[in-house]
Image: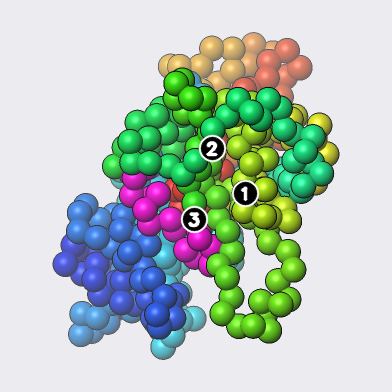
Amino acid sequence: MEFRQMKEHELKQAAVLANNVFRKDGEIQMEEIFPALFQPGVSHSYGAFDQYGDIVSFMGMVPLIINSGSVNLSAFSIGAVCTHPEYRGQGIASRLLSLCLQHAKDAGASLLFISGDKSLYLRAGSVYFGKSTQFILDPPAARHLVSEQNLWNFRDMKPEDIFAMHDLIKSQTGTIQWGLSDLQQFIGTSPMATLYGLTQYIKVAEIPGEGISAFAAIGIPRPDSSPEQHQEQTSQVGTVIEWAGSNKAVTALLSHLLSHFNLSSLEINLPWQYTQLSASLEEAGTGQIPSTNAGTLLVADGNTLITQSRLDSVHGHDLTISIDTEGTYILNSPDGASVIGGNAELCSLLFDPDTEITQPSNFKLKTLPLPYMYGLYFI
């Protein structure tokens, strides 16, 4: 068995394996859903190959940068992880994950975002991270949410909107560092919607003559071809996959989406930092389900994470984080030093506003905002 980084000409073979594992006949193929993984270009992914040179296991990796407040975090996303049925249970994926971790470290990344929480990742130290709330908007709540609805014009996205949408999504607090081509590609491939059996629509809210103030990507369940199941579908639940814009425009757009698509409810997941929109939805009487962010998180390199978070001795001021000789993270302040713990505790301290990690009473770390990781960007 050979374990190594994928070569460009081998990506088609990896896509065939992924299609056999994840997709059924007639469904959209993995190379169409995830061009960042399977189309020609620089590949960071890893594979395991048998004695004949055929791929038997694949672990996809895509680099990204998270704009988190005043800091930028270099990271990788891991997805489309698959192993041929005849080779499962042999620890192959664990070997690939170790190689991916080392690759991320060598590349200067601090984190791995994983689209899943299987035991493979949890055994390697992957943790649930951050804090988010799922808000469930129903028609009564939507009526309370409507404010100056007649100000807005709601319509489908046009190609000419891409610059305005890019500006809106860049202005979010805690976001993927989107390029224009990236944004267009993920809008077109709609990986979240496709994998969850949804049809994706992009809607915008604008004031005539003043431009776009908000947009939302929404997933609507596809009509079922079975008459029996169709009769059972008495409710239609929509999912907001991505959104950006001013609070007034977004709330007006959400209310419009509920009625426009004749939905029984509309679900939207908000990371903790979106306090204004969260307050508006809460005041309207929406249902709420507290949770973590989506997927799991694995620290690739603790020192790099500390440096990129600007909490090392060079960038830090009152608060810094160091690592002792046993690999334990230490929080240093003018009041003294205290033990943080391992990678799980460090992620809690950095990314969870409700962390239980002890901090000095006079010196508190600012929680780093992260985007909701199951959005337009999804690997």
The magenta segment: 182-199
Mark linked to residue 260: 1
Q: Which circle's residue, 3 or 1, is located before the other in the chain?
A: 3
Question: Residue drawn at (40%, 49%), measured in percent from left and top?
Answer: 187
Circle 3 sits on which residue? 200
Query: The residue under label 2 is which amino acid type?
Result: Phe
Circle 2 sits on which residue? 154
Question: Residue drawn at (21%, 52%), measured in percent from left and top?
Answer: 42
User: Which mark is nearer the camera, 3 or 2?
Assistant: 2
- Label 3's element? strand
Q: Residue 123 in the image: x percent, y percent?
A: 57, 62
Please tell me whether residue 220 is drawn above or below residue 334 in the rendered image: below
Colour convention: rainbow
Query: The residue under label 1 is which amino acid type?
Result: His
Other-residue count near label 3 (Cα within 10 Å), few / some / many at <14 / 14–19 / ≥20: many
Q: Looking at this view, is 93 or 265 the one in front?
A: 265
Q: Residue 61 in the image: x percent, y percent?
A: 36, 55
Query: The residue under label 3 is which amino acid type?
Result: Gln
